[in-house]
Amino acid sequence: MKQLSQIYTVLLLVALLSGCTTFSYYSQAIRGHLALTIAGKPVDSFINSEDTSPELRDKLILSRQALRFADEHLGLSPGDAFTDYVVLEQPWVVVNLVAVPEFSLQPHQWCYPILGCQAYRGYFHLEDARKEEAKFRAQGYDTFLGGVTAYSTLGWFDDPLHSGFTNLANDRMVALMFHELAHQVVYIKGDTAFNESFATAVELEGLKLWLTQEGDPAAFKQALMRLELRNHTHALVADTNAKLEQLFQQQDVLSEDSLRKRKQHLFDELNTHYEQLLASETVSKIGPFGHPPVDFNNARVALFTQYNQYVPAFRQLLKETGYDFPAFYRAVESLSEQPDESRQPTLDALSERFEENF
């Protein structure tokens, strides 16, 4: 029971340090993570059980192979992560809430001792997330609730594998495992975009190596097409964000009603361009935001930006370190230690030098 006592100690300490107003949030986090941990059983026991379906057994064997690959080829150290397996009652493990002021693109930050601030807050129960969302909506915030397939405890605990992973296609499951393991390498307090973009870059480059080694040209081609679609979608969102930033700078000039109408017009344009993009696709008609029309708002585009903003920069940094993953991680660690005012220009310069090489 050593791990359970560690979870109680760390999370209860955080709750006590943070005050009673946030105690209920940490309590649900404790209960949720403990329930997930207690429900876990060794992956090997599922692999060896006659009751395990052939499909699940193949996925679990694949997860073992992916862990070895992450250790041997990506410089990631899985430790005992993903060695237990849990069957979830729903397709997501937590629900994330993002809240952004009506005329801003800067997400609300939830701050925690030890972890620092984050631009989203996770809940194990949808009703808890909706209660918190209602408070922000009452204040006029744009909000978004999204189911999260996996989360990381940053290597503090042995995160389990679960059905959220194994319900994915093989390459997507492997990519998600790489993403979550990358969070154990580098983490900056208060910089969600840095953390998520770094993990996404490791996920993409790791998947490229994995599929190359597997010799699966069809899966590799589909992965590249999904990447291209993601890149095109990011370009559309970035263009919209730039226009929104210009609009929101006119708050002293325009009325709230005028701001609101122009903002909606920009999101309508984004929906049109997104729908046109998917119509031009020959393989996948499902983009990063799902099927159009999308209920775009500040929170939804902010969340997408957090995960993609610096991906080109980190992929370029990996290229400049000769695709030596340990050297890349050292470079990222060094970058993470820079103050914000110098880290941002460095990331921007790396992004400008990036050229797709898939």
Image (tube, rainbow, N blue to C red):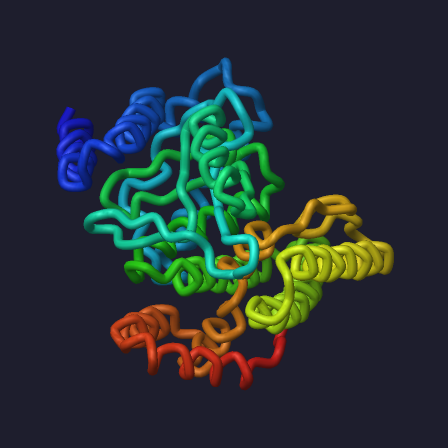
Q: Relative to 342, is 248 on the left or the right?
A: right
Residue at figure coordinates x 54%, y 85% from the top left? 353
Q: Position of residue 274 (x, y in %)?
A: 77, 57
Q: Nearer the viewer, residue 200 or 339?
A: 339
Instruction: Please provide percent x and percent y for residue 177.
Output: 45, 47
* Depth order, front residue of 326/252: 252
Q: Is residue 5 above or below residue 247?
A: above
Q: Residue at x 44, y 78 (%)?
A: 347
The total of numbered circles placed on residues is 0
Q: Quadrant of residue 272?
A: bottom right
Q: Residue at x 51, y 19 (%)?
A: 52
- Quadrant of the image for the N terminus? top left
Query: Is residue 212 something one can see in this rendering?
Result: yes
State the image coordinates of residue 269 (x, y, percent, origin top left): 78, 60
Residue 162 in the figure: left or right of residue 214: left
From this view, report whether residue 40 is shown above or below residue 94: above
Q: Is residue 127 above or below residue 171?
A: above
Between 142 and 127, the one lying in front of the other is 142
Please say whether residue 217 is visible from this viewpoint. Answer: no
> Which residue is painted at 54% across and 39% down in the image?
145
Q: Quadrant of the C terminus?
A: bottom right
Report the side of 34 relative to 230 (left or right).
left
Q: Position of residue 256 (x, y in %)?
A: 62, 57
